[in-house]
Image: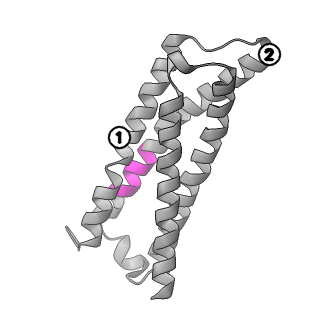
Amino acid sequence: MLTESLLAYAHFVAILTLVVFITSEAALCRPEWINAAVVRRLARVDIIYMVAAIAVLATGFARTYWGVKGFGWYWHQPLLHIKVTLFVIVGLISIAPTRAFIRWRKALDANGALPAEAEVRKVRKLIMVQAHIVMLIPLAAVLLARGVWAR
């Protein structure tokens, strides 16, 4: 029981960290706020967001492997597959903002150029899409925990 509790705790901490840093990206990535410090901060925040996403994935897999219900039960549940699919979609969407932050930082370092307003808006929109999809994952988790659609 202690193992299950610690696995759940680690997973929750990773999820909360991911949410904090995607929220930070959304808050910082605004055309009216873009300056050199924000461009550099976005690149750092994005790295932490990526590490948090990896931690969410790792702790989630750990829960399915070492958790009370076990690997066999979890991986036969449609809601787990929905959660993983949503997570993968968020990860794929996050590639474009990550590449933009790297490009912005390189341009800033090379010649002091800040990104265009239109590009900042486009990247912010992608971040917001990610944030909204992320909010569906806990719904699937709660339903899974309550045995909805369980096989």
Nearest to N terminus: mark 2 or mark 1: 2
- Distance from Cα at disc 2 to Cα at disc 1: 34 Å
Identity of the amino acid at label 1? His
Identity of the amino acid at label 2? Ala
Residue 73 pos. (x, y %): 35, 77
Residue 123 pos. (x, y %): 49, 25
Question: As drawn, which residue projects farthest toward the left?
Answer: 149
Q: Residue at x 44, y 88 (%)?
A: 1
Q: CB atoms at circles 2 and 1 under 8 Å apart?
A: no
Residue annotated with mark 1:
132
* Residue 87 in magenta stretch: yes
Badge 2 density bin: few <14, some 14–19, many ≥20, Cα 10 Å: few
Q: Vertically, is 16 above or below 123? A: below
Q: Give the range drawn in magenta.
A: 82-89
Q: Main secondary structure of the magenta part?
A: helix
Which of 65 and 47 lies nearest the eye of the viewer?
A: 47
Residue 103 pos. (x, y %): 67, 23
Residue annotated with mark 2:
110
